[in-house]
């Protein structure tokens, strides 16, 4: 993949770009709860749950097919920064491990994966810009009871600012219930 400019999208994630005048507490929300994996989160009620791949994969999708994808896997390690680096390697280089990657590529991965706290959870997070497809993506992951929960926003470039704020709100509402 060519040079990835995560700074813009990551800054949107970190600082938020709220739209409209309605505050988060005034918005009505949908609630997703996973009793099997012991977590829950809220999301805009106009988004539709796609739960055909439950229990460990599902999505919420809006009317324009922007989506937030969720996966649950056994955590390889209990270190979020390392988990984030592993996930970024898979996403950016389409390989399952770092063996054979140059030190420059490993350094690039370490620079884009950041640790952030939203609500009560700490996440690894990084952004990918697919300019050729007109898509921006944010990948975040957290740990809940030995499980890695990966949350991925996939949005069209023209809706990225609004969807990034909604994604940030979702991460803030995420709670491990175990």
Image (cartoon, grey):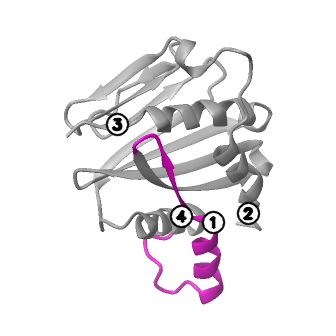
Residue for badge 2 = 4
Query: Looking at the image, which residue is at 66% across and 22% down?
Result: 64
Which of the 4 quarters of the picture holds residue 79?
A: bottom left
Depth check, front residue: 51 or 20: 20
Query: Looking at the image, which residue is at 77% across and 68% down?
Result: 3
Q: Is residue 77 left or right of residue 107?
A: left
Q: Which mark is residue 112?
A: 1
CA separation in Å, label 3 and label 1: 25 Å
SS category of the residue bearing label 1: helix
- Tell whether position 107 is magenta: yes
The spot of residue 118 in percent (x, y) is 49, 44
Q: Which residues are magenta?
A: 95-120
Tell me whether circle 4 and circle 1 mark residues in contact (CB < 8 Å).
Answer: yes
Query: Looking at the image, which residue is at 47% across and 63% down?
Result: 84
- Marks 3 and 1: which is nearer the front? 3
State the quadrant of the N terminus.
Answer: bottom right
């Amino acid at each position: 993949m060519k040079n990835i400019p995560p700074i813009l999208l990551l800054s949107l994630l970190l600082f938020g770009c709220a739209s409209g005048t309605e505050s988060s507490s005034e918005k009505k929300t949908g609630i997703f709860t996973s009793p099997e994996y012991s977590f829950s989160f809220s999301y805009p009620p106009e988004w539709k749950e796609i739960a055909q791949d439950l229990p460990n994969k599902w999505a919420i999708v809006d009317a324009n097919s922007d989506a937030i994808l969720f996966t649950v896997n056994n955590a390889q390690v209990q270190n979020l920064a390392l988990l984030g680096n592993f996930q970024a390697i898979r996403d950016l280089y389409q390989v399952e491990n770092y063996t054979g990657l140059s030190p420059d590529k490993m350094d690039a991965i370490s620079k884009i994966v950041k640790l952030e706290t939203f609500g009560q959870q700490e996440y690894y997070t990084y952004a990918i810009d697919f300019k050729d497809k007109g898509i921006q993506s944010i990948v975040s992951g957290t740990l809940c009871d030995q499980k890695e929960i990966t949350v991925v926003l996939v949005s069209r470039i023209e809706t990225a600012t609004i969807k990034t704020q909604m994604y940030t709100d979702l991460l803030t509402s995420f709670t491990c219930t175990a």
